[in-house]
Image: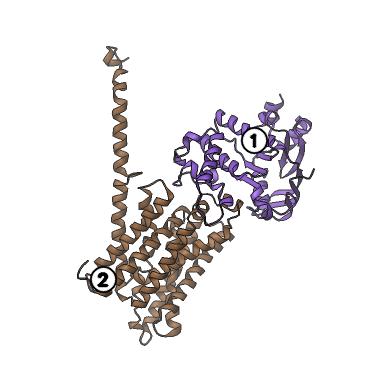
Amino acid sequence: MEPVLQVRGLHAAYRRTKVLDHVTFDVMPGTLTAIIGPNGAGKSTLLKTMLDLHPRLGGEVRFFGTAYRNAKLKVGYVPQRGSVDWDFPTDALDVVLMGLYGRIGWFRRPGRRHRELALEALDKMGMADFAKRQISELSGGQQQRVFLARALVQDADLYLLDEPLAGVDAATERAIMEMLKTLRAAGKTVMVVHHDLQTVEDYFDHVLMLNRTVIAHGPTTEIFTQDTIARTYGGWLRRKERVTG
Amino acid sequence: MMGLSHNALWVLASMLMLGTAAGLAGCFAYWKRQSLMSDALAHAALPGVVIGFAILGFKSLPVMLLGAAASALLGAWAVTAIRAHNRVKEDTAMGIILSVFFGLGIMLLTMVNRMPGGGQSGLDGFIFGQAAAMVRQDMRTMTAVAAVVLLVVLISFKEWKLYLFDPAFARGIGLSGRLMEAAYLTLLVVIIVIGIQAVGVILMAALLIIPAVSARYWTNAFGTMLALSALFGGGAGVAGTYVSTLGDGWPTGPFIVIAAAGIFLLSLVFGTRKGLFVKAMQRRAQMRRLKPQAVRRDPLAEGEALP
């Protein structure tokens, strides 16, 4: 089987600080991977650099065997919830519709079929009752679910999610994980920037442990060990103890 | 508006178009959190206008407007450059460019006014605006350009909404960020350039900023906000221009700003979404709903003494 994502020797920096140093890994189709690492390890930067949202200083990234610009519609990206202004005057359904813009075509208006697709996606995230709700009036968890619904309607083959479970309620966390597992069952590939070490083994079949460079990468059962956690988090002993002790 | 001369009607019609276009572009600047950018661009246009006049030695609007566009874009580039290579924040960079370019413009203007024939250049009109000084050709240009802006916004409404709400996602699904950024800047510069003769470089930004902010008080839908902002901009343009033509040599810009400020005050108080009046009414209704409960739970009402 061909990998859906190949990253070779990726380098990136913020001003003069190197954030990604020779990052290399392959992702196989149908996997659900957690990207974990301490604050400042370059998790979000890795996603942004792969998607050409952050300048790449070196290395190569291939999606489905080609450059990102040729595979855009096959890749669904869910940025961090805090990356947009939720005071923007629009409702939940409208945000989900944005996921269809690529398919609707530029300069064309969305039709009734598109609206139905968007409603369906909201329903899958348990948000059908909030379709006409102002996005500023949604809770953090609900906003995250709207973002996920927008990714769903994109009908991509590879999903990259930046901390979708950060600061959400238990119901949202369940809804999101259910959705990700459904996607995997449908043969899609999912990568998630994750921060909660305690749920890694329950939620993800693969794990990419990152601290500026790849510390370990592979099936969770094989590589998510006390040793690799210690190497990834270095001085973050307190967390390590909480997970392994 | 009976009794207005044919020319005055032309002036009002072109100001309506300008205000409408400015109201639309102002919404974009508002959601890019770059309201001050329009102010910096307008001020930065002045040196270009004066240089355009100085090179030719006589007044030619197309050349002066070309100069205005060039120096406004130079200003925009300078803001980006200052921010990219230093730890200076964007508003600081805009503050620097705004004052430096305006200072340079005034300095050049003073020099040009001392040149033979310079006193009658009418360049002073570019500072506070002089709608009455426009000739028919200027008004035609203004109306045509404003109509194009309107058309662009109508056609690409959905693209603007996506780009303004979530630019990273927009790029992800193939909407070029660079293209949208260029389109946004072009729109802003074009409106400023066609507007400065009538409204003036100092106050041009008000026509871009105030209608958008006012519209925000009335609606929670982006499309409605655009429409209202266009309406407010057009209204302020017409009302301010009309009043300014009542006096001889009255500048147009200040009257437009006062008209826009009136719309803003009304919106601030009576706006149906975030207006102060509506908020106060909602608070009162809420208090009334909560009151009976509060009384029932009052310990004194049940004969208990306070500790």
Residue at figure coordinates x 36%, y 48% from the top left: B217
In percent of width and height, residue B179 lies at 56, 61
Residue B244 position (above or below residue A59): below
Q: Which residue position holds label 2?
A: B250
Question: Is the residue marked by circle 2 packed among few (<14), some (14-19), or many (20+) residues within 10 Å?
Answer: some
B9 or B264, nearer to the observer? B9
Find residue B122 and report its horizontal and vertical position in percent: 34, 78
Q: Which chain is brown?
A: B
Q: Is residue B257 above or below residue B54?
A: above
Name which quarter of the figure residue B21 lies in. Answer: bottom left
Mark-to-mark CA distance, 2 and 1: 66 Å
Residue drawn at point x = 35 percent, y = 44 percent: B274
- The answer to whether residue A52 is left or right of residue B286 is right
Whether residue A168 is visible, yes or no, is: yes
Marks 2 & 1 on one chain:
no
Query: Do callouts 2 and 1 mark residues in contact (Cβ within 8 Å)?
Result: no
Give percent across and percent down for residue B228: 36, 54
- Residue sitting nearer the eye, A47 or B223: B223
Q: Which residue is disc 1 drawn over?
A: A180
Left or right, B117 with reference to A151:
left
Look at the image and tell me whether residue B95 can be seen. no
- Whether A206 is drawn above or below B30: the answer is above
Q: Name above or below for residue B264 compared with residue A35.
A: below
Question: Please, which residue is most extreme toward the left here?
Answer: B3
Answer with left or right where residue B121 lies relative to residue A123.
left
Q: Nearer the viewer, residue A174 or A164?
A: A174
The amino acid at mark 2 is: Trp
Determine the secondary structure under disc 1.
helix
